[in-house]
Image (tube, rainbow, N blue to C red):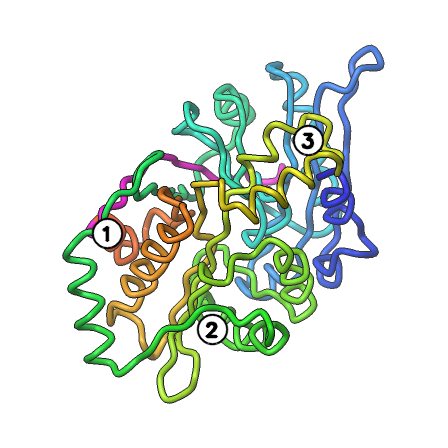
Amino acid sequence: MRRDVKLLLSREKNPFFDHAEAEYFLALCDGVVVGRIAGISNRLHNETHEDRVGFFGFFETSDDPAVAEALLNAAENWVRTKGHDILRGPVSFSTNDECGLLIEGFDTPPTLMMPHNPPYYLALLERAGFTKAKDLLVYEGGGKGAYKPVPERLTRGTELITKRLGVTLRPLNLKDFDAEVERIKELYNACWEKNWGFVPMTEREIDHLATQFKPVVEPTLVPFVEKDGKVIAFALALTDLNVVFRKNRSGRMFPVVLKLLWALKRHTINRSRVLLLGVHPDYRNKGLDAVLYHWMWTKAAEIGIYWGEAGWILEDNPAINAGLIKMGFVEYKKYRILDRAIR
């Protein structure tokens, strides 16, 4: 929605700007816009990783090396003034938002909050001197258009793990939404703190995101794992709203919002995306990720969702990648984040 993009870019309303700055650039040729880019300086990222990386994001360009180089140079020149020595991207604005350049999987449409770009972008960036920093892997699971049973080994494993650890699962309680968000806050930054590129979300950022998700969240697709009354793991999957959004070329609210509300009420969207899955460090490598996937797979099927995307996952996260494959997921897309030394 145009309204959502306007909010995202607003330096006054987006809490990302509590700890960051950005400048926006357009490329014009004979008065026609042929590209765009943002230069981004994220103080919280640099403090977390003790580096001086600046970012570029919201990158769109015509298939013209001159246009791409002009855009990238504009972002580079701006982040240089902020004291950075590496330009990294595309990241719009951080790894908590849309990030990565699609390099494999162009034949399938993007799910909610995942970028999609033409194949020529990679060649333009490499020609401009960018090299691979990290690849992000994306998986698909379930059936396309029809129910695919949960793998038997996943069902058996879930039963054993829940019994052995003495844990219980429950869905998000919308009537206690504010308290549920507080429980997620306690877990979120602890779950991802050591990941490459991770930037902790502030309380205001989590509150902001929760406010956006609340009208469209399906409670059964947000499971919590509890032990002795305390949440130790959670996952967040959303119905793939892009099924409705991609038909709305204007980006305006009406009539697409009415179609969206109807689709959510009638459960006519049969795709989903698993955005987050986090386990408290004290309970990692005990199989709780499989327990959460089993819950989402079965509960999604009950409301007519038969296909799901899981990701992105860092390429050098062997535990999660191997676990997804064992559960029957298949890698079907790959994104890349690239670096260039600031000259």
Q: Position of residue 104 (x, y in %)?
A: 39, 29
Q: Main secondary structure of the magenta part?
A: strand
Q: In this picture, which residue range is highlighted in magenta?
A: 326-343
Question: What amino acid is at disc 3?
Answer: Asn
- The residue tagged 2 is 190
* Crowd rating for badge 2 (residues with CA inside 10 Å; few <14, some 14–19, many 20+): some
Front tag of 3 and 2 = 2
Between the C-alphas of marks 3 and 1, the distance is 49 Å
Q: Where is residue 173 in the image (x, y as percent from the top left)?
A: 53, 72
- The residue tagged 1 is 150
Secondary element at image label 3: helix
| Residue 340 lies in the magenta-colored region | yes
Residue situated in front as seen by the camera: 266 or 170: 266
Disc 3 or 2, which lies upstream in sequence? 3
* In the rendered image, the vertical position of residue 119 relative to residue 173, given as above or below: above
Residue placed at 60% from the left, 72% from the top? 177
- The residue tagged 3 is 73
